[in-house]
Image (tube, rainbow, N blue to C red):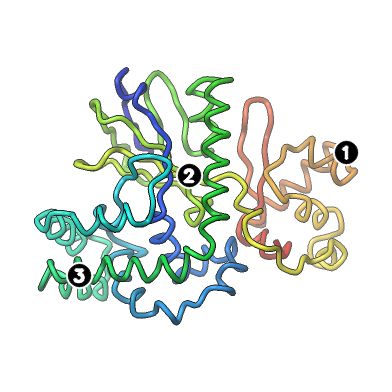
Amino acid sequence: MALDLRLGPVDVTGIRFARSPMWETMEATRTVREPLRQAYHLSWLRAVDVDACADALAVLEPLTPRGGNQPDFLIPIPSGPTTTIEDDLAAVAAIPIDIVVAELERSLHAPQASDQVRAGVRALLADPGHSLERIVAAQRSCWDHLVRPYWPAIDDLLAADIAHRAAQLASGGLAAVIDGLHPSISWSDGVLVFGGNYHGATDEVRGRGLVLMPGVFTWPHTVAATDPPWQPTVVYPARGVGTLWPPGSRRTPGALGELLGASRARLLVALDEEASTSVLARRVGLGLPTTSEHLRVLRAAGLVTARRAGREVRHRRTALGAALAGA
């Protein structure tokens, strides 16, 4: 079920973009642990020194469970598009202990939390003041080893995405910006509809404004954070993540052709970026009906996804499709 964010006039005028070094750091720790995320970031994963921050990852692991609740205090909502990691670390360190305890308690009692997660959270609750210091130190270590060496490239990508959205706002208005963030996000009559597992919830933003934040390590997923006292925030996939890391060895269409068939292999390799059916047909030299049929088969096999954008249907590779293409 969808989450409906109802924005009043003040909220609409208060919509802003931001990017967060801490968000990327925490999501990078998830990527290290979750193989389904890794297909998009294999070159990065092979280059980083995970062992150097193993102790830090262990501290943060119960706070970033695959099932359960991640405390909101871990990632302060950035004040603007130029927030630094030092700003973020200082903000986490300054969180009042009563908020730390309340959010850890919520993680402890989350219905989806595993016994291992609950044990880790209980250990942190035993001395929350000291635990907050450990958490901040662990975040700094993960930043230093997982993200900082690559931050200039990540930051450029995030800045380019925000610049693109700003130009889109000027040319097409707010609806064009919101509708272009992700297929699961749409805008209608002052309501931002956010697809996902939210049990049909409705949240009144009530003058708190809204932050739109591109994410690299979240890609291709979206996240909504709306609980007070934090400012409502929607994280969406940044454009151009496929260009961020150095390319691996690309499989040739001929090699893939033995598995998929020559035409489908060419289509999969041609999907370096999201493209419409007609564009793909021109790229690979096939007729439109033939291209549509091959794309239908690739979607059914879980190698490609599709979304409607106006009169077009746009296609992109899934993680499995990217791995098969060697991208």
Q: Secondary structure at mark 1?
A: loop
Q: Earlier in the sequence, mark 2 or mark 1?
A: 2
Q: Secondary structure at mark 2?
A: strand
What residue does disc 1 label?
A: 287
Q: Position of residue 184 (x, y in %)?
A: 48, 39
Q: Between marks 3 and 2, how big is the CA–CA gap?
A: 29 Å
Can residue 204 be seen here? The reply is: no
Position of residue 295 relative to residue 11, above or below, is: below
Q: Amino acid at mark 1?
A: Gly
Q: Amino acid at mark 2?
A: Pro
Left or right: 171, with 205 as reference point:
right
Left or right: 244, with 197 as reference point:
right
Question: Which residue occupies the foreground of this view, 56 or 3?
Answer: 56
Q: Nearer the viewer, mark 1 or mark 3?
A: 3
Residue visible at 15% across and 71% down in the picture: 130
Residue visible at 42% across and 44% down in the picture: 82
Disc 3: CA contacts within 10 A as few (<14), some (14-19) or many (>=20):
many
State which quarter of the image contains the C terminus.
bottom right
Q: Secondary structure at mark 3?
A: helix
Q: Position of residue 119 (x, y in %)?
A: 20, 75
Question: Which residue occupies the foreground of this view, 156 or 109?
Answer: 156
Disc 2: CA contacts within 10 A as few (<14), some (14-19) or many (>=20):
many
Question: Which residue occupies the foreground of this view, 158 or 62?
Answer: 158
Q: Between marks 2 and 1, how big is the CA–CA gap?
A: 36 Å
Q: Position of residue 257 (x, y in %)?
A: 84, 63
What residue does disc 3 label?
A: 121
Q: Earlier in the sequence, mark 3 or mark 2?
A: 3
Q: Between marks 1 and 3, how big is the CA–CA gap?
A: 57 Å
Q: Position of residue 324 (x, y in %)?
A: 71, 65
Q: Nearer the viewer, mark 2 or mark 1?
A: 2
